[in-house]
Image (cartoon, grey):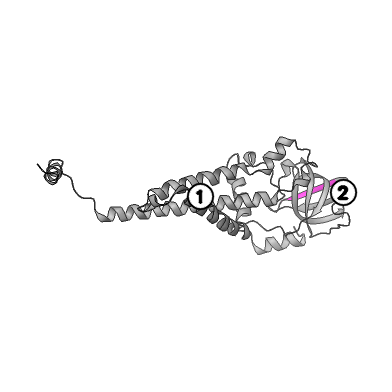
Amino acid sequence: MTLQEQVLKKIKNQNLRPTPKGYFKARDYVLWGLLGLFVAALAVSAGMIIFMVRGTDQSLFARLGLTLSERLLYSIPIFWIIVTLVAGLAAYANLRRTRRGYRVGKKQFVIAAVIIAIALGSLVYAFDGAQYIDHEAAANIPLYTTVVPLDTATWFDPEHGLLSGAVHVKTSDDYFTLRDENFNLWTVTGDHVALVPADFTFQSGDHVKIIGKKIGDFKFQAVEIRPFETPVKPPVGATTTAATSSTTGAI
């Protein structure tokens, strides 16, 4: 019996049927769709790494009394590095399952992935997508603030000694109220607070970032006050009226 006859006999005996062409097309669509999602995740995580690294202010670590291990932990965005690696591996595994994915070698994929991650991640960072993601992750992902405990990028982490927002009513450099990015009103006090730079002055409506410690519900003791280079943006979904009232200091 020839090979052809053997194959035909096996097909007949096992009642085999050809797989419809539409199955393979649908499979390709699913695989490429998943690849797109993994690439998007790679871009987001890369953008978050850029956001965390650029936002880290090494000069304040000593002021917060952090140990060397804490400084390393807070300086390296371990959480987002892990997410980037997982997204990259998932994208590679998915690409290899596509029709011509076997042609892409590991070295080629790594180079392409790094270029794509940096390019798209930079766009995510440039359009403030990373700041929004960080804010939403802190609000909705359990233990996120434990894994990423010091938010030096936005300077809003009262539990770890960082506070930022718009000055509401100023009595003195040592006593004023401040509206944070969530539109909560804080009472800020201090004893001969240091202003950095030394010639820095601020008035009601100005945006500042503060080093100190939380001493109660919406009460903060300031040790050092710095100018906030960029305006504090209202959370997504906030009305224009609310944003205006935050800038002017109106309740």
Front one among 61 and 128: 61
220 left or right, relative to 79 = right
Q: Which residue is mark 2?
A: 194
Residue 237, image x and y in percent? 60, 58
Of the residues shown, which amino acid type is indicated by label 1?
Val
Residue segment shown in magenta = 184-189
Residue occupying the point 84% across, 55% down: 170
Residue occupying the point 59% across, 42% down: 79
Asked whether the viewer can see residue 17, the reply is yes
Residue 16, image x and y in percent? 18, 45
Q: How many marks?
A: 2
193 left or right, relative to 185 = right
Label 1 sits on a secondary structure element that is: helix
Q: Quadrant of the C terminus?
A: bottom right
3 left or right, relative to 133 = left
Of the residues shown, which amino acid type is indicated by label 2?
Ala
Q: Which mark is residue 110?
A: 1
**Mark 2 surroundings: few (<14), some (14-19) or many (≥20) residues within 10 A:** some
Residue occupying the point 44% across, 52% down: 35
Asked whether the viewer can see residue 153, the reply is no
Residue 144, image x and y in percent? 61, 42
Front one among 202 and 99: 99
**In terms of image quadrants, where is residue 204?**
bottom right
Q: CA distance from mark 1 to mark 2?
A: 48 Å
Q: Main secondary structure of the magenta part?
A: strand
Front one among 75 and 197: 75
